[in-house]
Amino acid sequence: MTGTLVLAGTPIGDVADAPPRLATELAAADVIAAEDTRRLRRLTQALEVAPTGRVVSYFEGNEAARTPELADALAGGARVLLVTDAGMPSVSDPGYRLVAAAVERGIKVTAVPGPSAVLTALAVSGLPVDRFCFEGFPPRKPGERRSRLREVADERRTLVYFEAPHRLDDTLAAMAEVFGADRRAAVCRELTKTYEEVKRGPLSELAPWAAEGVRGEITIVVEGAPDTGPQDLDPEELVRRVQVREDAGERRKEAIAAVAADAGLPKREVFDAVVAAKNAAKAADKGAEKGAGRGPA
Protein backbone atom coordinates (compact mmCIF):
# COMPACT_ATOMS: atom_id res chain seq x y z
CA MET A 1 0.00 0.00 0.00
CA THR A 2 1.62 3.26 -1.10
CA GLY A 3 1.47 6.48 0.86
CA THR A 4 0.24 9.95 -0.02
CA LEU A 5 2.07 13.14 -0.93
CA VAL A 6 0.36 16.22 0.49
CA LEU A 7 1.29 19.65 -0.87
CA ALA A 8 0.36 22.16 1.80
CA GLY A 9 -0.18 25.84 1.17
CA THR A 10 1.25 28.02 3.95
CA PRO A 11 0.53 31.68 4.82
CA ILE A 12 2.25 34.25 2.62
CA GLY A 13 2.29 36.68 5.55
CA ASP A 14 -0.44 36.64 8.17
CA VAL A 15 -0.35 33.30 9.99
CA ALA A 16 -4.09 33.65 10.63
CA ASP A 17 -4.57 32.87 6.91
CA ALA A 18 -3.36 29.28 7.43
CA PRO A 19 -5.98 26.84 6.15
CA PRO A 20 -7.59 24.88 9.04
CA ARG A 21 -6.51 21.54 7.56
CA LEU A 22 -2.84 22.56 7.70
CA ALA A 23 -2.63 21.98 11.44
CA THR A 24 -4.21 18.54 11.10
CA GLU A 25 -1.78 17.52 8.36
CA LEU A 26 1.24 18.83 10.28
CA ALA A 27 0.27 16.72 13.27
CA ALA A 28 -0.49 13.55 11.28
CA ALA A 29 2.32 13.43 8.71
CA ASP A 30 4.90 10.65 8.89
CA VAL A 31 7.44 12.90 7.19
CA ILE A 32 7.42 16.69 6.84
CA ALA A 33 9.64 18.03 4.07
CA ALA A 34 10.20 21.73 4.71
CA GLU A 35 11.97 24.35 2.64
CA ASP A 36 13.22 25.93 5.88
CA THR A 37 12.95 23.89 9.08
CA ARG A 38 13.33 27.01 11.23
CA ARG A 39 10.33 28.65 9.59
CA LEU A 40 8.44 25.40 9.97
CA ARG A 41 9.17 25.48 13.70
CA ARG A 42 7.81 29.02 13.98
CA LEU A 43 4.72 28.03 12.00
CA THR A 44 3.95 25.00 14.15
CA GLN A 45 4.41 27.07 17.30
CA ALA A 46 2.02 29.73 16.00
CA LEU A 47 -0.54 27.05 15.11
CA GLU A 48 0.06 25.27 18.43
CA VAL A 49 0.86 22.00 16.67
CA ALA A 50 3.39 19.39 17.80
CA PRO A 51 4.46 17.32 14.78
CA THR A 52 5.15 13.66 15.53
CA GLY A 53 6.66 12.79 12.16
CA ARG A 54 10.24 13.09 10.97
CA VAL A 55 11.21 16.57 9.75
CA VAL A 56 13.67 16.92 6.86
CA SER A 57 14.86 19.90 4.85
CA TYR A 58 13.82 20.11 1.21
CA PHE A 59 15.09 23.20 -0.58
CA GLU A 60 16.63 24.19 -3.90
CA GLY A 61 20.11 23.03 -2.87
CA ASN A 62 19.14 19.46 -1.93
CA GLU A 63 15.88 18.95 -3.84
CA ALA A 64 17.37 16.72 -6.53
CA ALA A 65 19.29 14.57 -4.05
CA ARG A 66 16.48 14.21 -1.49
CA THR A 67 13.64 13.48 -3.91
CA PRO A 68 14.49 9.74 -4.33
CA GLU A 69 14.57 9.32 -0.53
CA LEU A 70 11.13 10.89 -0.13
CA ALA A 71 9.76 8.97 -3.10
CA ASP A 72 10.92 5.73 -1.46
CA ALA A 73 9.19 6.75 1.78
CA LEU A 74 5.99 7.36 -0.16
CA ALA A 75 6.31 4.01 -1.91
CA GLY A 76 6.68 2.41 1.51
CA GLY A 77 3.36 3.83 2.70
CA ALA A 78 4.37 7.09 4.38
CA ARG A 79 2.24 10.22 4.37
CA VAL A 80 4.66 12.95 3.31
CA LEU A 81 3.72 16.59 3.84
CA LEU A 82 5.58 19.15 1.74
CA VAL A 83 5.64 22.78 2.89
CA THR A 84 7.59 25.76 1.60
CA ASP A 85 8.32 29.12 3.21
CA ALA A 86 5.13 30.69 1.87
CA GLY A 87 2.39 29.80 -0.59
CA MET A 88 1.97 26.59 -2.55
CA PRO A 89 4.84 24.12 -3.06
CA SER A 90 6.12 23.71 -6.64
CA VAL A 91 4.92 27.18 -7.71
CA SER A 92 8.34 28.86 -8.01
CA ASP A 93 9.25 26.81 -4.95
CA PRO A 94 10.59 23.29 -4.36
CA GLY A 95 8.14 20.50 -5.09
CA TYR A 96 7.92 19.79 -8.81
CA ARG A 97 10.53 17.03 -8.76
CA LEU A 98 8.82 15.19 -5.91
CA VAL A 99 5.38 15.50 -7.50
CA ALA A 100 6.75 14.14 -10.78
CA ALA A 101 8.46 11.25 -8.98
CA ALA A 102 5.27 10.39 -7.09
CA VAL A 103 3.13 10.51 -10.23
CA GLU A 104 5.62 8.27 -12.05
CA ARG A 105 5.27 5.66 -9.30
CA GLY A 106 1.50 5.87 -9.22
CA ILE A 107 1.45 7.46 -5.76
CA LYS A 108 -1.48 9.65 -4.75
CA VAL A 109 -0.80 13.40 -4.72
CA THR A 110 -3.20 15.80 -3.03
CA ALA A 111 -3.08 19.34 -1.69
CA VAL A 112 -4.15 21.55 1.17
CA PRO A 113 -5.22 24.72 -0.67
CA GLY A 114 -3.83 27.86 0.83
CA PRO A 115 -2.85 31.49 0.24
CA SER A 116 -1.26 32.35 -3.09
CA ALA A 117 0.79 35.46 -3.81
CA VAL A 118 -0.09 35.11 -7.50
CA LEU A 119 -3.86 35.15 -7.01
CA THR A 120 -3.75 37.70 -4.19
CA ALA A 121 -1.69 40.13 -6.29
CA LEU A 122 -4.02 39.67 -9.26
CA ALA A 123 -7.06 40.33 -7.11
CA VAL A 124 -5.76 43.63 -5.69
CA SER A 125 -3.94 44.85 -8.82
CA GLY A 126 -6.90 46.55 -10.44
CA LEU A 127 -5.90 44.98 -13.78
CA PRO A 128 -7.94 42.49 -15.85
CA VAL A 129 -7.89 39.03 -14.24
CA ASP A 130 -10.19 37.03 -16.52
CA ARG A 131 -7.12 35.65 -18.33
CA PHE A 132 -3.59 35.64 -16.97
CA CYS A 133 -0.29 33.77 -17.13
CA PHE A 134 2.36 33.32 -14.43
CA GLU A 135 5.95 33.85 -15.56
CA GLY A 136 7.79 33.20 -12.28
CA PHE A 137 11.09 35.01 -11.68
CA PRO A 138 12.63 36.84 -14.67
CA PRO A 139 16.23 35.83 -15.50
CA ARG A 140 18.88 37.67 -13.48
CA LYS A 141 21.16 38.57 -16.40
CA PRO A 142 20.01 41.71 -18.28
CA GLY A 143 20.31 40.19 -21.77
CA GLU A 144 18.44 37.02 -20.85
CA ARG A 145 15.81 39.06 -19.02
CA ARG A 146 15.09 41.27 -22.04
CA SER A 147 14.97 38.21 -24.29
CA ARG A 148 12.44 36.50 -22.03
CA LEU A 149 10.32 39.64 -21.84
CA ARG A 150 10.31 39.94 -25.64
CA GLU A 151 8.82 36.45 -25.84
CA VAL A 152 5.65 37.72 -24.12
CA ALA A 153 5.64 41.32 -25.37
CA ASP A 154 2.54 40.59 -27.48
CA GLU A 155 0.80 38.45 -24.85
CA ARG A 156 -2.68 39.86 -24.28
CA ARG A 157 -3.25 38.07 -20.99
CA THR A 158 -2.27 39.80 -17.74
CA LEU A 159 1.27 38.79 -16.71
CA VAL A 160 2.38 37.94 -13.17
CA TYR A 161 6.00 37.82 -12.01
CA PHE A 162 7.93 37.32 -8.79
CA GLU A 163 11.05 39.44 -8.26
CA ALA A 164 13.72 40.08 -5.65
CA PRO A 165 13.62 43.63 -4.22
CA HIS A 166 17.22 44.45 -5.20
CA ARG A 167 16.46 43.66 -8.88
CA LEU A 168 13.03 45.28 -9.01
CA ASP A 169 14.09 48.62 -10.51
CA ASP A 170 16.12 46.97 -13.28
CA THR A 171 13.28 44.58 -14.11
CA LEU A 172 10.66 47.35 -14.23
CA ALA A 173 12.96 49.44 -16.43
CA ALA A 174 13.42 46.47 -18.80
CA MET A 175 9.64 45.95 -18.86
CA ALA A 176 9.10 49.61 -19.73
CA GLU A 177 11.61 49.25 -22.57
CA VAL A 178 10.16 46.02 -23.98
CA PHE A 179 6.43 46.31 -23.17
CA GLY A 180 6.16 50.08 -23.54
CA ALA A 181 6.40 52.90 -21.01
CA ASP A 182 2.62 53.34 -20.81
CA ARG A 183 1.81 49.70 -20.04
CA ARG A 184 -0.03 49.60 -16.70
CA ALA A 185 1.30 47.51 -13.83
CA ALA A 186 1.04 46.97 -10.09
CA VAL A 187 3.89 46.18 -7.72
CA CYS A 188 2.55 44.26 -4.73
CA ARG A 189 4.86 44.27 -1.72
CA GLU A 190 4.60 42.32 1.54
CA LEU A 191 1.12 41.00 0.77
CA THR A 192 -0.98 40.34 3.93
CA LYS A 193 1.91 41.51 6.12
CA THR A 194 2.16 44.57 8.36
CA TYR A 195 3.73 46.80 5.71
CA GLU A 196 1.64 45.64 2.76
CA GLU A 197 1.78 48.07 -0.16
CA VAL A 198 0.40 48.05 -3.70
CA LYS A 199 1.92 50.61 -6.05
CA ARG A 200 -0.02 51.05 -9.29
CA GLY A 201 0.81 53.02 -12.41
CA PRO A 202 2.50 52.91 -15.83
CA LEU A 203 5.85 51.11 -15.99
CA SER A 204 7.58 54.41 -16.74
CA GLU A 205 6.58 55.69 -13.29
CA LEU A 206 7.10 52.48 -11.34
CA ALA A 207 10.72 52.00 -12.41
CA PRO A 208 11.98 55.31 -10.91
CA TRP A 209 9.92 54.67 -7.77
CA ALA A 210 11.57 51.26 -7.32
CA ALA A 211 15.03 52.79 -7.86
CA GLU A 212 14.59 54.65 -4.57
CA GLY A 213 14.68 51.31 -2.75
CA VAL A 214 11.99 48.72 -2.06
CA ARG A 215 12.04 45.93 0.51
CA GLY A 216 10.12 42.73 1.10
CA GLU A 217 8.49 40.01 -0.97
CA ILE A 218 7.54 41.34 -4.41
CA THR A 219 4.90 40.29 -6.93
CA ILE A 220 4.53 42.25 -10.18
CA VAL A 221 1.29 42.28 -12.18
CA VAL A 222 1.51 43.71 -15.72
CA GLU A 223 -1.33 44.54 -18.06
CA GLY A 224 -1.46 42.42 -21.21
CA ALA A 225 -0.64 43.82 -24.65
CA PRO A 226 -3.41 45.86 -26.25
CA ASP A 227 -5.56 44.30 -28.95
CA THR A 228 -4.39 46.03 -32.10
CA GLY A 229 -6.41 43.88 -34.50
CA PRO A 230 -4.90 41.51 -37.06
CA GLN A 231 -1.12 41.80 -37.15
CA ASP A 232 0.91 41.83 -40.35
CA LEU A 233 3.28 38.98 -39.44
CA ASP A 234 5.26 36.98 -41.95
CA PRO A 235 5.14 33.15 -41.78
CA GLU A 236 8.62 32.98 -40.23
CA GLU A 237 7.50 35.10 -37.27
CA LEU A 238 4.36 33.00 -36.80
CA VAL A 239 6.47 29.83 -36.75
CA ARG A 240 8.90 31.42 -34.29
CA ARG A 241 6.07 32.32 -31.89
CA VAL A 242 4.67 28.80 -32.06
CA GLN A 243 8.13 27.38 -31.35
CA VAL A 244 8.56 29.64 -28.31
CA ARG A 245 5.33 28.31 -26.84
CA GLU A 246 6.22 24.71 -27.64
CA ASP A 247 9.61 25.17 -25.96
CA ALA A 248 7.73 26.41 -22.90
CA GLY A 249 5.75 23.16 -22.75
CA GLU A 250 2.58 23.86 -24.73
CA ARG A 251 1.30 21.27 -27.18
CA ARG A 252 1.52 22.34 -30.81
CA LYS A 253 -2.24 22.52 -31.27
CA GLU A 254 -2.64 24.86 -28.29
CA ALA A 255 0.43 26.89 -29.31
CA ILE A 256 -0.97 27.44 -32.81
CA ALA A 257 -4.36 28.47 -31.40
CA ALA A 258 -2.74 30.92 -28.96
CA VAL A 259 -0.50 32.51 -31.61
CA ALA A 260 -3.46 32.86 -33.96
CA ALA A 261 -5.54 34.49 -31.23
CA ASP A 262 -2.76 36.89 -30.26
CA ALA A 263 -2.17 37.87 -33.90
CA GLY A 264 -5.86 38.10 -34.76
CA LEU A 265 -5.45 35.54 -37.52
CA PRO A 266 -7.29 32.34 -38.49
CA LYS A 267 -5.76 29.23 -36.94
CA ARG A 268 -5.48 27.70 -40.42
CA GLU A 269 -3.06 30.46 -41.49
CA VAL A 270 -0.71 29.74 -38.57
CA PHE A 271 -1.08 25.98 -39.05
CA ASP A 272 -0.17 26.26 -42.72
CA ALA A 273 2.93 28.32 -41.85
CA VAL A 274 4.08 25.68 -39.34
CA VAL A 275 3.51 22.82 -41.81
CA ALA A 276 5.32 24.69 -44.59
CA ALA A 277 8.31 25.33 -42.32
CA LYS A 278 8.38 21.68 -41.27
CA ASN A 279 8.30 20.50 -44.89
CA ALA A 280 11.03 22.97 -45.85
CA ALA A 281 13.23 21.69 -43.01
CA LYS A 282 12.71 18.07 -44.14
CA ALA A 283 13.58 18.95 -47.73
CA ALA A 284 16.73 20.73 -46.60
CA ASP A 285 17.76 17.71 -44.50
CA LYS A 286 17.26 15.34 -47.45
CA GLY A 287 19.30 17.62 -49.69
CA ALA A 288 22.10 17.69 -47.15
CA GLU A 289 22.05 13.86 -46.85
CA LYS A 290 22.28 13.44 -50.63
CA GLY A 291 25.14 15.88 -50.82
CA ALA A 292 26.99 14.07 -48.05
CA GLY A 293 26.38 10.71 -49.72
CA ARG A 294 28.07 11.66 -53.01
CA GLY A 295 31.45 12.08 -51.41
CA PRO A 296 34.51 13.40 -53.29
CA ALA A 297 34.63 12.88 -57.07
Image (cartoon, helix red, strand yellow):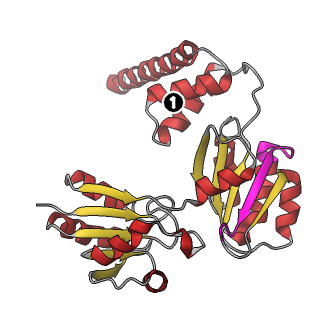
Q: Residue 92, how many percent across, how many down?
A: 51, 60
Residues rendered magenta in the picture: 177-192
Residue at numbered disc 1: 255
Q: Residue 222, how many percent across, how many down?
A: 72, 48
Which quarter of the image is occupied by the N terminus? bottom left
Residue 235 visible within the image: yes
Disc 1, SS: helix
On whether residue 258 falls in the magenta region, the answer is no
Residue 244 occupies which quadrant of the picture? top right
Q: Residue at x 44, y 86 (%)?
A: 41
Q: Residue at x 58, y 49 (%)?
A: 134
On whether residue 185 falls in the magenta region, the answer is yes
Above or below, 28 against 130 in this view is below
Residue 270 occupies which quadrant of the picture? top right
Q: Residue at x 41, y 21 (%)?
A: 282
At label 1, the amino acid type is: Ala
Q: Residue 2, how many percent across, how many down?
A: 15, 61
